[in-house]
Image (cartoon, helix red, strand yellow):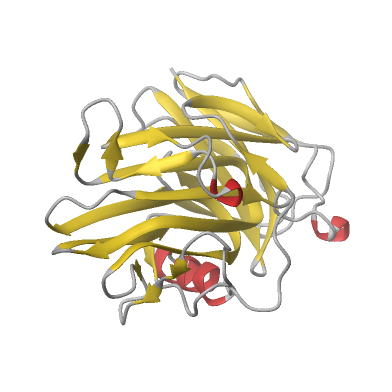
Amino acid sequence: MNKRVLFAFALAIMSTTSWAQCPNHVEHLEGTATVNGVDVTVTSEGFVDWNSGYCAGTTPYFIGYNYNSFLSGNGSYTFSFSPAVTAVTLNFSGISDQNGNYEEVRLWVNGQHYAIPEPGTDNMCDDMAILTLQGNIAGCDECATSGWLGTHIEGPISSITVEDTVYLGTPNGAIFSLFICDPSGVGIAEEKLMENGFFSPNPFSSVTRFVTEATIPEFTMYIFSLDGRILKEMKVSKYENVILSSEGLSSGIYFYQFVSEEKIIASGKLIAK
């Protein structure tokens, strides 16, 4: 399975229909915290802030605006998950299209633009936002604030970026919340034969080996950057030792996934020194 096929597979099984909201609220603004057994690393770029009071279902992330400077501009939060999660739910509020001020919210899943297939439901705070032809979220015409609840995306998801892009004027930014479901693969234990395995040494400087007592099936190993880009992929034959070289990897944090027959059978975090 090559990179394009993997991304196509991941995106093909993502949908916003017929799903309840994921239960686990991500609330930290930076760094790494554990949420329902998943290490969630949060980073941000550009104009960002936090929301504590407006539209309770959409706390705490604010993009496209900063309270301290009172300035608008492009801004984003990126969430990286280890292990990958099965699904996320996003709720939105505060998106504006009024008096010549126009912005859009775009999503990036595993490093690829994610076109939202359909609008969510009323958030009880704003007018209903608009779904653009490109699958982004925009404010309704001449609406001070717009939004919706319940954009549900199926995984596996290693990373997601929520970005506010300012196209005209100085809009007031967008607000959102993020909820995650269980780590990828929960509920298909028979396919998680290598879940208890681990790389050793980790952190590693030159070579690391995957240690497991399980029988190793045929699979493809993917190494992801924090923003979800695939940096390495390697096919592994049945019973073969799994050895990873640091060649081409700078010092930092990475994620790995083992994919067999389009199912993730192991995933986790790697640290290169």
Q: Position of residue 254 (x, y in %)?
A: 48, 35
Image position of 13 (left or right of 232): right
Residue 271 location (% of width, % of height): 51, 24
Q: Nearer the viewer, residue 27 or 227?
A: 27
Q: Is residue 16 above or below residue 171?
A: below
Would residue 53 be visible to someone looking at this image? yes
| Numbered-mark total | 0
Quarter holding residue 155: bottom right
Write the residue at 43% across / 17% down. 273
Q: Nearer the viewer, residue 57 or 78?
A: 57
At 56% from the left and 43% from the top, the residue drawn is 256
Give the side of residue 145 with respect to residue 169, left or right.
Answer: right
Q: Position of residue 77 (x, y in %)?
A: 40, 41
Residue at 28% x, 45% y: name it. Answer: 64
- Could you tell me residue 239's position as x and y percent? 73, 50
Does residue 248 appear in the picture of this structure?
no
